[in-house]
Image (tube, rainbow, N blue to C red):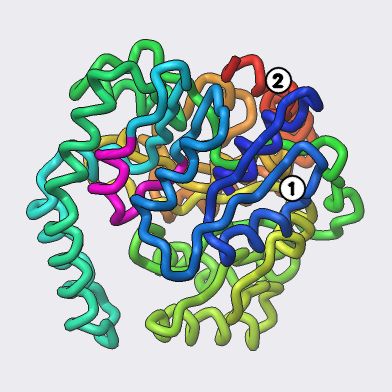
């Protein structure tokens, strides 16, 4: 998604030539998002090629800017990667805390959350292996981030909230805010016009790990008849096999008459967009119990609001940029979320005003507008 956003932004100017250095598997996913224009070229990593050798191949191209959109586990290779000084390099942050905080502490907290979760089907050995690998990788992750902090690499972040948190570690005053998802006017369709019920979309993996599904289901179960008559709930994301407790409750609600959409398979990008366009409003049920107001990372719901030109419902305490102030409704607690749903149902004009404001916001995140942030 990040690559698609960057590529579409640069490709909006036909005089730009874009090279995408990636794997064959990732290339298929990127091409599926219509990134096949004549000024876009793919350079694929060989099946047995090392990351270092692949990065070295980029030096044979006369590039004037490079966007590093991922360095997952190849931290050492990226640390030793040195593009020419004439080439401007940008690094995209996602989860800031991984780069600056102790990996031991982060993994200990992660394992505690995984093992204390209601889900007892978790693969303990697999979780432990992942944590140990991440701690091992962290040596060069810290060296890499120290390097870009001092060598003039351009920093790209997701929000002003991220800037606030990043400023604790380095000067983020000139960091560029750039979204994970963008608005594509030529592709967008408002498929919600004929909705007979308010369609609430909850994008992302249906997992209790980062989102609060159990409390949401409590509301739907307590008022099943009301929601059956007035709402469609679209769980627009894959339900992992380990979430059987969630899945059982979801299926029971559907059997009880609730119009709830769910997916036990991965949704391709084309279908995802169509389902997103059908929604009236997006609900973010993100967990915000880290005390940081989600300053270190972002939830995909913000960017699906941009992508679909939809308003949102967020838990109070979530730090949203000022761009979205006229497109979002907040709720204090989950029992009070029912009142928010009811108010939107009773005041259809308010919902329409929110949707109109959302469209105006999304136009600022179209490729031609975003290009001005990068160049």
The local secondary structure at tag 2 comes to: helix
Dominant secondary-structure state across the stretch colored magenta: loop
Of mark 1 and mark 2, the one earlier in the sequence is 1
Q: Residue 35, which numbered label?
A: 1
| Mark 1 vs mark 2: in front | 1
Q: On the picture, is 247 further left or further right than 101?
A: right
Question: Dividing the picture into quarters, in which one does residue 211 lie?
Answer: bottom left
- What x and y, as percent, mark residue 8? 70, 37
Tell me where the magenta segment starts and ends, as one range. 69-81
- What x and y, as percent, mark residue 120? 25, 85
Q: Is any atom of residue 360 visible in this view?
A: no
Front-most of residues 244 and 59? 59
Query: Which residue in the rendered view is the most extreme toward the right?
Result: 194
Q: Residue, x 19% and y 82% (percent of image)? A: 124
Q: Residues within 10 Å of mark 2 (few under 14, many from 20)?
A: few
Query: Which residue in the rendered view is the most extreme toward the top?
Result: 173
Residue identified by numbered label 2: 369
- What x and y, as percent, mark residue 39? 77, 37
The answer to whether residue 356 is magenta is no
Front-most of residues 75 and 168? 75
Q: On the picture, is 338 further left or further right than 210?
A: right
Q: Residue, x 46% and y 53% (percent of image)? A: 285
């Amino acid at each position: 998604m990040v690559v698609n956003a960057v590529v579409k932004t640069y490709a909006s100017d036909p005089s730009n030539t874009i090279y995408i250095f990636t794997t064959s598997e990732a290339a298929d996913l990127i091409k599926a998002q219509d990134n096949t224009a004549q000024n876009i070229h793919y350079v694929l990593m060989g099946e047995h090629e090392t990351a270092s050798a692949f990065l070295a191949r980029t030096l044979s191209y006369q590039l004037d800017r490079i966007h590093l959109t991922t360095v997952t586990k190849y931290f050492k290779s990226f640390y030793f990667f040195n593009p020419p000084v004439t080439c401007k390099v940008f690094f995209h942050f996602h989860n800031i805390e991984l780069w600056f905080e102790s990996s031991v502490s982060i993994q200990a907290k992660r394992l505690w959350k995984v093992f204390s979760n209601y889900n007892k089907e978790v693969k303990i050995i697999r979780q432990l292996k992942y944590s140990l690998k991440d701690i091992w990788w962290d040596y060069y992750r810290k060296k890499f981030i120290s390097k870009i902090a001092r060598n003039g690499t351009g920093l790209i972040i997701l929000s002003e909230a991220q800037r606030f948190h990043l400023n604790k570690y380095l000067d983020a005053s000139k960091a560029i805010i750039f979204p994970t998802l963008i608005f594509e006017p030529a592709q967008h369709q408002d498929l919600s016009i004929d909705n007979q019920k308010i369609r609430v979309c909850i994008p992302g993996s249906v997992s209790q790990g980062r989102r609060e599904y159990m409390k949401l289901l409590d509301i739907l179960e307590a008022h099943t008849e009301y929601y059956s008559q007035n709402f469609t709930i679209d769980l627009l994301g894959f339900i992992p096999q380990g979430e059987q407790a969630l899945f059982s409750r979801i299926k029971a609600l559907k059997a009880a008459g609730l119009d709830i959409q769910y997916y036990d398979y991965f949704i391709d990008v084309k279908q995802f967009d169509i389902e997103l366009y059908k929604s009236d409003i997006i609900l973010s049920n993100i967990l915000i119990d880290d005390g940081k107001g989600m300053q270190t990372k972002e939830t995909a719901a913000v960017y699906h609001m941009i992508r679909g030109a939809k308003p949102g419902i967020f838990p109070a305490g979530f730090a949203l940029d000022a761009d979205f102030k006229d497109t979002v409704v907040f709720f204090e607690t989950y029992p009070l979320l029912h009142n928010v749903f009811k108010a939107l149902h009773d005041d259809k004009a308010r919902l329409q005003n929110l949707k109109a404001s959302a469209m105006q916001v999304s136009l600022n995140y179209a490729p031609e507008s975003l290009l001005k942030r990068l160049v």
